[in-house]
Image (cartoon, rainbow, N blue to C red):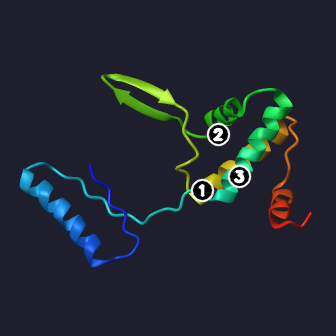
Amino acid sequence: MTDFFITELTLPGVERMTRAIQAVVESGNMAHIKVQPKKETRSLAQNRLYWRWVGQIAKQTGHSKRDVADYYQSELLEPVITEFNGKATESIRSTKDLSVEDFSEFLQQFQMMAAESGFQLTSFDDLLKAAMGLR
């Protein structure tokens, strides 16, 4: 399967996409074509904040960052279900493909859940101030 990501509607991009569609049609195979707007995935600032919080909880519990991240992702995100060879397997969903809005919601839920568990997290304001050199 070939994915095309077009950031600007240019003739070379449209021609490349047209050639790929034509090749599928000429091969006699079926094709599924889906056109949708691109969603922006999580921002770097969101990712930095998330891993900072994960690190803070890891320090407070003695667990690894990976263990902390896996725990919260398994609690707050829908699992990925993969079916292969007649068997369904479930795995932890990654945050890397979340949209900015979905990751924002995840961070809010993460912060609430961590607070309910008694963990002390540096607030977003503190992170923003530190990033801007305002401390």
Residue type, mark 2 in image: Leu
Q: Residue at x 67, y 32 (%)?
A: 66
Residue 4: image quadrant is: bottom left
- Residue 100 located left or right of residue 81: right
Q: Amino acid at mark 1?
A: Arg
Query: Looking at the picture, how far across and down is residue 33, in whole percent?
Result: 26, 58
Q: Which mark is residue 42?
A: 1
Residues under numbered marks 2 and 3 in contact, where contact means CB atoms less than 8 Å apart: no
Horizontal and vertical percent position of residue 11 = 26, 78
* Residue 56 sits above or below residue 91 on the image: below
Quadrant for the C terminus in the image: bottom right
In the rendered structure, the answer to whether residue 77 lies left or right of residue 108 reads left
Residue matched to label 3: 48
Q: Which residue is mark 2?
A: 76
For label 3, the SS is: helix
Element type at marker 2?
helix
Residue 65's tag is none
The residue at the point 86 percent across, 38 percent down is 119
Instruction: Report the side of 119 relative to 103 (left or right).
Output: right
Discs 3/1, front: 3
User: Where does the image place residue 102, in percent across and percent down from the top left?
Assistant: 60, 54
Q: Residue at x 60, y 56 (%)?
A: 42
Nearer to us of marks 2 and 1 is: 1
